[in-house]
Image: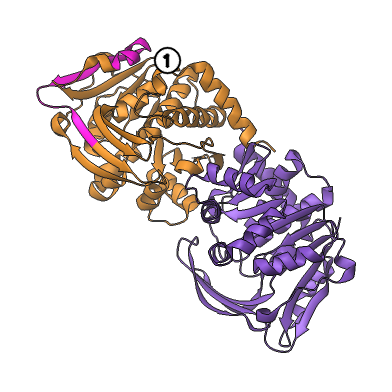
Chain colours: A orange, B purple
């Protein structure tokens, strides 16, 4: 089934203990697409400036990512700069130049409006609402967001959460959204308060937890001795997750659990190198191999 | 097979968001025994003061815990006071009165010296070495320690680690002992540097990881909406872990993994109430039920 993602396309400048890369391709929509496209076609809606080098995304086009919803505006492409600390869990933003992204109004091309699987990447919740207003009747809407919107645009964000099927948050975000320190209670409260079916809590190196229909599922993070660049981990996780579900076109406990493992597997490849340096040449065979390894990590 | 534990016996005063308890029974040796005794007999070596109320440990005696190695000295029993923060992960020590524990020299009763399974609870590594010097030829020595000894008595601690088969550390401790920020690398470095067979890293609400023979095993924490008092979680985990291994009298990938789940299950019961209020009346049937629940938490 067709997957639609609305999110950012950016040039990232990233410093990690393993080096620095200037103006690499990045952005939530691209990381999502790179992962989701292993399982089927993906349609991207986003904006870039006239400085955008389209050759940088040709590897995605080859993999079935459709960019008819990519708007090119006069001005510069969104730029983000960040530095990761030695533990690679904490990072500081060095700069954010929204550029053409500042006035982005997501217009969904009519041929994308009946997409069945929609991923709202982390953008202004008011824009996420505009996206939902344009969609016909998606089977599954998956939401990502961040602390900035939880505190800054809470009302709009709560409205988006209510209209989604699955919310993906990290541990801090789920605590902030629910105002609950206990993670289990926090996730449950989000489910009950906003009548959302499923919550996924990402815990970085500690893995991810699925809360669905009163049950829990714990996925470990793949054990990596070297995390080179965590940028895009959350979006490539979401891409593997949504892409797998769309390929199965069935949402149940079994597919949700497997989708989380596929997402975790692809995210673990993503962080092994800068930007798309690892995802670019990754194969489905490698993903399947790592999927199986996850089984042996938790078997007893 | 017989299990020996050398550790503290204490009166704890604990404050958590759920209340305060003054002078409850506590100490690593007792939490360990309460858990380990579900699987077979346990022999305790420790010290208390003349103020110790022996009736408080009669539930352990009934469960097969042997206290012939409990020395009663004139003076007061070790007292510890702590306050847990709202997230129940961080705590501050309010007071530590070592009392009779200050001059504790662990003398292992001769009938305990051929114990096959030995748990060195978190005490001064110099005393842990004295314990090892008295033992005949244990099959398995399991070590617990803390940051205080890693920084304060590093040389003695390193010597203990070299003489142990399994080291149980939390994530901060394994990073400090190895001087490595990456958890996977850190655990591997401990294994290689000290030629120790197995490292277990406890991550609190994020579960535990087993590093053994080049493989990894991730055990989730049991999802609890209410953690009343985390005191003794690590020692009851170790008790379930060592107790199960001793009952099987076989150390391999399979028994180690199951032992970690038994340890995690008992620790999860322990933190559901203050002191021994939950472990006191716990049954093996309840533990087995929770063991099975752990399977469903990670199955995909």
Relative to the observer, which residue lies in front, B89 or B47?
A: B47
Q: Is residue B3 left or right of residue B189?
A: right
Q: Is residue B26 left or right of residue B223?
A: right
Q: Is residue B263 above or below residue A241?
A: below
Q: Is residue B164 above or below residue A106?
A: below
Quadrant in which the N terminus of chain B is drawn: bottom right
Residue B252: percent from left, percent from top: 76, 41
| Residue A75 lies within the magenta run | yes
**Residue density around tag 1, few if under 14, some if 14–19, many if 20 or more, within 10 Å:** some
Part of the protein shown in magenta:
A57-80
Residue A216 sits in which quadrant? top right
Residue B286: percent from left, percent from top: 73, 54
Relative to the observer, which residue lies in front, B65 or A108?
A: B65
Q: Residue furthest right?
A: B111
Q: Is residue B239 left or right of residue A55?
A: right
What is the secondary structure assignment of the residue under circle 1?
A: loop
Residue B247 appears in the figure: yes
Residue B185: percent from left, percent from top: 54, 42
Name the chain letter of the residue that bears numbered label 1: A
Residue A233 sits in which quadrant? top left
Q: Residue furthest top?
A: A62
Look at 60% across and 28% down and name the residue there.
A293
Residue B190: percent from left, percent from top: 60, 48
Q: Which residue is mark 1?
A: A40
Look at 31% across and 18% down and name the residue there.
A43
| Residue A268 lies within the magenta run | no
């Amino acid at each position: 089934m067709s997957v639609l993602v609305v999110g950012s396309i950016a040039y990232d400048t990233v410093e990690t203990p393993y080096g620095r890369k200037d103006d690499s391709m990045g952005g939530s929509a691209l990381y999502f697409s790179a992962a989701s496209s292993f399982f089927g076609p993906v349609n991207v809606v986003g904006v870039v400036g006239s400085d955008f080098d389209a050759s940088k995304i040709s590897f995605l086009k080859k993999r079935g990512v459709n960019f008819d919803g990519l708007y090119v505006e006069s001005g510069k492409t969104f730029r983000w700069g960040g530095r990761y600390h030695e533990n690679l869990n904490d990072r500081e933003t060095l700069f954010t130049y929204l550029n053409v992204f500042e006035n982005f109004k997501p217009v969904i091309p009519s041929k994308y409006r009946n997409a069945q699987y929609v991923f709202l990447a982390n953008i202004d919740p008011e824009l996420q609402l505009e996206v939902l207003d344009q969609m016909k009747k998606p089977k599954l809407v998956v939401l990502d967001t961040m602390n900035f919107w939880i505190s800054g645009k809470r009302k709009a964000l709560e409205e988006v959460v209510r209209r989604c099927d699955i919310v993906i948050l990290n541990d801090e975000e789920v605590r902030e959204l629910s105002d609950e320190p206990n993670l289990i209670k926090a996730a449950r409260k989000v489910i009950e308060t906003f009548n959302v079916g499923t919550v996924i809590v990402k815990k970085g190196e500690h893995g991810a937890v699925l809360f669905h229909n009163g049950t829990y599922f714990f996925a470990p993070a793949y054990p990596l001795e070297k995390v080179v660049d965590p940028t895009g981990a959350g979006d490539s996780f979401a891409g593997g997750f949504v892409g797998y579900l769309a390929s199965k076109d069935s949402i149940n406990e079994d597919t949700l659990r497997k989708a989380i493992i596929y997402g975790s597997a692809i995210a673990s490849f993503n962080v092994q190198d800068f930007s798309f340096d690892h995802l670019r040449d990754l194969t489905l065979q490698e993903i399947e191999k790592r999927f199986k390894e996850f089984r042996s990590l938790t078997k007893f």
